[in-house]
């Protein structure tokens, strides 16, 4: 595992003030491999929170901003200005900062989903980033070593022609109407169409599941038939997602995402079956993956351990097998490989790292699913929306 | 666990000659608790196989038949004639024997699905069994102690209002076109519409999954949206089943059944989530069940071990927890409790044991799913078919 | 799986009256494969219990005995007398019946440990069975298909030279002084030296663990260093067993048995490591076994499923993989294969089935361990005792 | 989870040059929570490796040293000199640097075992650290959140009086004589008495297992009876460790450590049983812990999720349950909490963080075990050595 302390990238952050979960995650991810120095932030639109959060993180006073526009302008003007920025605000606040920083020539690391609407996502595609500024969408689950391994195994034909893709992402934290409690800001914006967009669970976690299936199988989606439900009284967005999938070439799939399934903390799971073999992986025990060659015993592949086929070159393994790596390390791999891209020595990662196009497809997936669900679960093509 | 050797029931069998899997299973199930004596059989339509199989099982020569009609007639006429018969032939050969024995006043134990067509199933309902002869459909998975426990927990409200039902039944034994090999008779008839009916995997295992979900939750099905696929070239019936389910009262579900999922031997699994808690059970490790009260740690309930709510009265536990019981014991529980019904001391089991009505509903499920799949996965009501 | 209903063996039973656990288990085991007919019994020394139990099992009145001596005499004299007898009494009541029936020319199936004392076990070896009557010791865990597979894999060299053997058998049912409650007869005699012998947990479950390790590895034991403890106040026999093992040829092992380990129902587990590979098996999920060839991924071998080396010929598989078999089936395999031995067509099983010599070695193991523990855990040879 | 970027601690490192595993781990651990800045290093005694490694990590040229003595002297003299140093050399090279830096008033973070000999460990205790310089021993497994939870549960009496402690640490990476291959420096020094000390596996991983058992249970060890073996031909130190343990107050335990157990990557596991309940935890799936209150269902406690008793205040949880944290995060917790101690706001952590006294006890454990093993496994008191 490379360390490159000699050439750290100056990083800024939009959102992620005190108490925010995902901003904290991005910061840890930026530190693990030592590729970034956080030096500026518009961490909150509330000046006091912005200042307190910034000081606690060791930012210089003059680089603590309360507006991302100001930050983009000021940092672009500094000789030691930030080279990259992490956008960790709610969905509806992704588009504005992403545009501003890209047009200022600053690389953008953006949380998913890319925007709140498909329209915004498409507008983002039109932008002309200054100086070739790059974009990374943090579909972090693609950073797990064994997810990379799965992708390469499918690509190499180890499973044969893919027939069936079962992906699911059950959680339980929205089983009760916590968004009405007044003290769960994360639940509030996620269930609020004006901040989340037209999808609830489907946007928050369904896109992760969808992206994971796409990343591993490489299959192109033809159409979805969806049945979205809001089970909790007065909830405005779906909290349970049932989708059937049809892929080009004939493979079929199912996607289940739920935030009302008691006993499931963060149960993202992918199973892929072809005519020669099958793969099964769970995010909550991510250092292990089942591989079955049809007619032979199941094998337990381990991160960093014995793999019966060529290990994926793109796996980013920090410590030996049996010493578990987790969510933060997978997230850090995206940061670290994007740092290589920024430095100009990461060409091999460009195809792997989730891109703006992936973000647009994610929005197509959400949009088509919502349409299908509103239309008696009619099969709806992603290309129609 | 009761033993009642003093009052054994005289049993016959139709089908189940040498080499047949399910006939053997029925015989073991009939022996485990010592409630039956196998004394007659039409084990095969091929005289030689019938005779050899019968002798091996210790049947008297004059009670080895080659025709079920003859057997029904002859046994009904004997003073020591059989009291019950097990029908273990392929699907299209259920209706005839079931009718013959019921009309001869002999209790019928019939493998699932009840018939090859919904029409036949409905005709069976019309029959007037002589002397109140009873009928048992061997949806054997309902005999597992923890499945019974699950049913009673749902009924008692331990999960609250049910919202989501995820059931799946993946296998892999039809990944390749074994039915074309010439030496896999079980695969042959299961993929042959003239013997199986209109459903392949959906009839063979999908009905088990469907029945299990219905048995545990007690929810009534409103409609299905199905996408059935035959992945193996030249296969005439579906080998992969994707279905979305809508239940009365608003619960939603997904059902996946597959016979082309490498690495899955017999992976029947049920997960049920309500607004107060969740349950998860897998058939391949059936002595354990997860129960989560929302907001509390997951509990591992064990067959015969500690249960945090009243243990189900209907559990049939033979040996202490930690000493695994399996498939044959669950199957035997149906046999044993049906024996009580036959003897007249099993009133409490009548509502539990899978009935002719369950069989008809199973055929409605198959029929509606096939129709939906043929009709662009349109939501199709069971009551429409 | 063979069925041989045409030639059933007439069976009797000593012990196993109403409410007894292990007698019930033996009866089910005798029924599963249809090789035996239970026709006589001295099920209890209390006449009323004997009679009621016998009638319930369908025994003829004149074959319900209250004394095993009488039963041995009377049955040996009948033309249709029993051919075999199951002895399922507490340990101190094994020797008498075993001697009586063997000397009457009746085959003996005896629960473990073989006797309450090493002295008795050795006296049993001296007996001259009439007409070559055979003896089976029900170390039932050796009947599990994957235990047989493990044994053959070790023998075939798949693990290389065995270095380390870790075996354990934790339970929790004696965590509290239930034997003092007055309503736990099973706990009472197991903690009573006058009925159990000098060992508590070591005799009840330690011998099973020891036998399993010996059965699978084939290694001969050199010496033991033991630390036995009775944790529950006023308990007269050990309820926790710590033993280090040295085998001939240099392999080392550890054995842990406990009846005071909360959360463990019946956690028998064996792990064997050689210079080429390792095997791991747990009784509470017995249809699966881990096999690792050093340097390759772990494989999950399944009962009836894919096995990467030749499947053991001695596995007795009734139903397909994924359809779990359990404790009763493993137990039944001993009964069924002993039936073959009795009928004269089971020569291949003789080396596999636990024998009188295994019983004597089990008593040496108990005796040496108790001596070592009383002697500051000094290494004690089995051959010394 | 606190971040304190405003007051970073200046850190140096001894050892950990290019290619070294544990030095890399310490660096990541120091970065995760953002409490340290690595600014100096004697990363290797080979000047070229030291320089290249230092430059890669972004160290200034004048702070890249090749001798720890020089580094201690020079850094102590700088105004911006390091405040703390990480010692990540082989065992025999711990004592010298630890002494030098402590006497220079620089806090020491030292890998385990504390020294190569008990004598050295005791000499370390005698040292007078300048300016109250502190010492941290990186028994990193104590940093796992659920290990902290386990410790507090035992302390709170949730398990009652502890009776049985089963701890094990199997690995397989030394199954073959890799230390003779010439390209496995980590294996070389670990199997070389002149660099490792008198213990092989017992020093490398046995001490971790021992420390974990002690940390969680708080029990004091009375004596050990050990059987250490070197299975690989020509290996000079033990690669398999069997130990029985006696604790003050009567609890008993077993410890197994092995580096020759194929199929085990890093299988540290602790099981603790008291008269009221039991706990079970495995390092390779560290976000889960089993807890059983005797007579109730097993509960699966999760890091950050529902806990049925008060959650441990000392757990250091970064991200929500279901998002796995791993080895590096646990390691980082020691670094982060030691940073608080250094800054003067970490009083509550002092009792938790592994100390010099723990290091000395670890050496007593190794020494007593080696003596016992050399003495026919005689019970040997830690206080004797």
Image (cartoon, coloured by chain):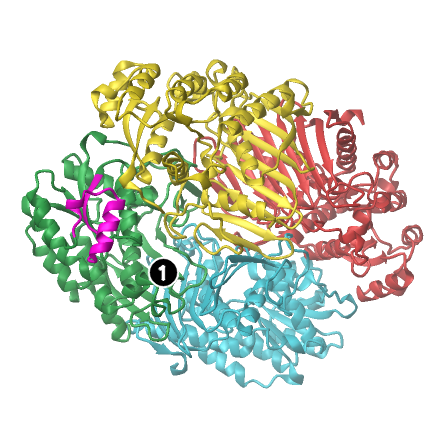
Chain colours: A red, B yellow, C green, D cyan
Report the front residue among B178 and A44: B178
Q: Is residue D237 visible?
A: no
* Residue C52 lies in the magenta stretch: yes
Residue shown at 27%/45% (left/top)?
C56
Is residue D184 shown above or below C198? above
Please name the residue that numbered disc 1 is placed on.
Answer: D235
Q: Is residue B270 left or right of residue C189?
A: right
Chain label for disc 1: D
In this picture, which residue range is highlighted in magenta? C37-65
Is residue A296 shown above or below D299? above
Residue shown at 12%/50% (left/top)?
C71
Which image quadrant for residue D162?
bottom left
Report the front residue among A88 and B240: B240
Report the front residue among B381 and D221: B381
Q: Quadrant of the N terminus of chain C?
A: top left
Q: Is residue A244 left or right of residue A22?
A: left
* Residue D100 lies in the magenta stretch: no
Q: Quadrant of the C terminus of chain C?
A: bottom left
How far across and down, in percent of the image, does residue C108 sit?
16, 48
Q: Is residue A363 visible?
A: yes
How far across and down, in percent of the image, does residue A78 sit?
91, 55
């Amino acid at each position: 595992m490379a360390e490159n302390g000699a050439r750290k990238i100056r990083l800024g952050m939009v959102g992620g003030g005190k108490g925010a979960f995902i901003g904290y995650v991005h910061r840890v991810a930026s530190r693990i491999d030592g590729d970034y120095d956080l030096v500026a932030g518009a961490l909150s639109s509330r000046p006091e929170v912005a200042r307190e959060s910034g000081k606690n993180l060791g930012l210089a006073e003059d680089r603590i901003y309360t507006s991302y526009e100001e930050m983009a302008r000021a940092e672009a003007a500094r000789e030691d200005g930030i080279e990259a920025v992490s956008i960790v605000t709610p969905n509806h606040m992704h588009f504005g900062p992403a545009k501003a920083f890209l047009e200022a020539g600053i690389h953008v690391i953006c949380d998913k989903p890319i925007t709140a609407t498909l329209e915004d996502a498409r507008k983002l595609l039109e932008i002309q980033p200054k100086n070739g500024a790059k974009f990374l969408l943090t579909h972090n689950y693609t950073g797990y070593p064994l997810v990379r391994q799965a992708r390469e195994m499918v690509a190499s034909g180890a499973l044969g022609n893919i027939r069936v893709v079962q992906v699911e992402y059950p959680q339980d934290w929205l089983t009760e109407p916590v968004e009405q409690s007044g003290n769960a800001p994360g639940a509030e914006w996620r269930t609020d169409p004006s901040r989340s967009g037209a999808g609830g669970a489907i946007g928050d976690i369904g896109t992760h599941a969808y992206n994971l299936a796409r990343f591993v199988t490489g299959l192109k989606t033809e159409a979805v038939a969806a049945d979205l439900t809001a089970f909790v009284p007065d909830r405005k967005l779906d909290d349970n997602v049932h989708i059937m999938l049809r892929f080009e070439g004939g493979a079929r799939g199912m996607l289940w995402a739920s935030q009302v399934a008691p006993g499931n903390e963060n149960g993202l799971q992918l199973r892929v079956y072809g005519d020669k073999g099958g793969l099964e992986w769970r995010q909550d025990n991510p250092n292990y993956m089942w591989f079955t060659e049809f007619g032979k015993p199941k094998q337990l592949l381990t991160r960093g351990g014995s793999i019966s086929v060529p290990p994926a070159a793109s796996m980013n393994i920090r410590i030996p097998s049996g010493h578990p790596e987790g969510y933060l390390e997978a997230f850090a791999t995206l940061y670290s490989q994007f740092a290589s891209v920024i430095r100009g020595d990461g060409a091999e990662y460009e195809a792997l790292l989730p891109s703006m196009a992936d973000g647009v497809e994610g929005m197509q997936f959400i949009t088509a699913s919502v349409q299908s669900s509103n239309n008696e679960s009619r099969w709806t093509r992603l290309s129609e929306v």
